[in-house]
Image: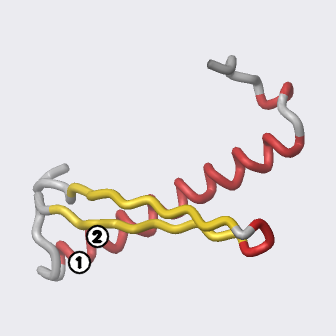
C-alpha cells in the first residue's frame, strides 16, 4: 500500500485529482442531504427508508465512463 503523502509532497497532477474528488464528494453530499431532508419534510420520502443510487463519471476525451451503484439509507428521525 502506498504511503500517505503530505500535500506539499504531491505532484500538481495528484493535487488536481484530490481537489476534484474532494469537490465531487463534498458538493454532492451537501446537495443530496439538502434535497433528501426537504423531500422527507414534504412527505415525499419516508424516514429510515432507502434510495437506490447510480452515479456516473464521464470523461469524453478519455472515452472513460465509470458507474457506481449503491443504496443510500435515509436518516432516521433526529439523525
Task: Quadrant for residue 65, please give it.
Answer: bottom right
Could you tell me which residue is drawn at 27 percent across and 58 percent down?
71
Question: Marks 1 and 2, Cα distance to the nearest angstrom?
Answer: 5 Å
Residue 58: % across, % down: 63, 70
Question: Which label was assigned to residue 36?
Answer: 2
- Give the quarter of the image for residue 70: bottom left
Mark 2 residue crowding within 10 angstroms, few (<14) / some (14–19) / many (20+): some
**Image quadrant of residue 24?**
bottom right
Q: Is residue 63 above or below residue 6?
A: below
Residue farthest to the right, as pictured: 12
Q: Secondary structure at mark 1?
A: helix
For mark 1, what is the residue?
39
Question: Which residue is depicted at the point 71% across and 50% down?
Answer: 19
Nearer to the camera, 51 or 26: 51
Type of colouring: secondary structure
Q: How many marks?
A: 2
Q: Which residue is most to the front? A: 63
Image height of 19 relative to 41, above or below? above
Is mark 1 in CB contact (under 8 Å) with mark 2? Answer: yes
From the top left corner, tell me how far across and down residue 1 is, in percent.
62, 19
Judged left or right of residue 14, residue 49 is: left
Taking the spot 12% from the left edge, 80% from the top edge, the residue there is 43
Relative horizontal placement of residue 58, taking residue 36 as reference (left or right): right
Q: Could you tell me residue 64's position as x and y percent?
A: 67, 65
Q: Is residue 17 above or below residue 49?
A: above
In the drawing, what numbered circle is on residue 16? none
Callout 2: SS:
helix
Task: Please indicate whether residue 67 sits to the left or right of residue 41 in the image.
Answer: right
Q: Residue at x 79, y 42 (%)?
A: 15
Image height check: is 4 above or below 46? above
Q: Residues within 10 Å of mark 1 (few under 14, many from 20)?
A: some
Amino acid at each position: 500500500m502506498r504511503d500517505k503523502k503530505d500535500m506539499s509532497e504531491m505532484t500538481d497532477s495528484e493535487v488536481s485529482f484530490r481537489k476534484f474528488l474532494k469537490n465531487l464528494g463534498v458538493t454532492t453530499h451537501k446537495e443530496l442531504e439538502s434535497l433528501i431532508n426537504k423531500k422527507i419534510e414534504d412527505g415525499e420520502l419516508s424516514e429510515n427508508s432507502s434510495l437506490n443510487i447510480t452515479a456516473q463519471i464521464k470523461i469524453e476525451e478519455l472515452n472513460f465512463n465509470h458507474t457506481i451503484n449503491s443504496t443510500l439509507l435515509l436518516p432516521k428521525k433526529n439523525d
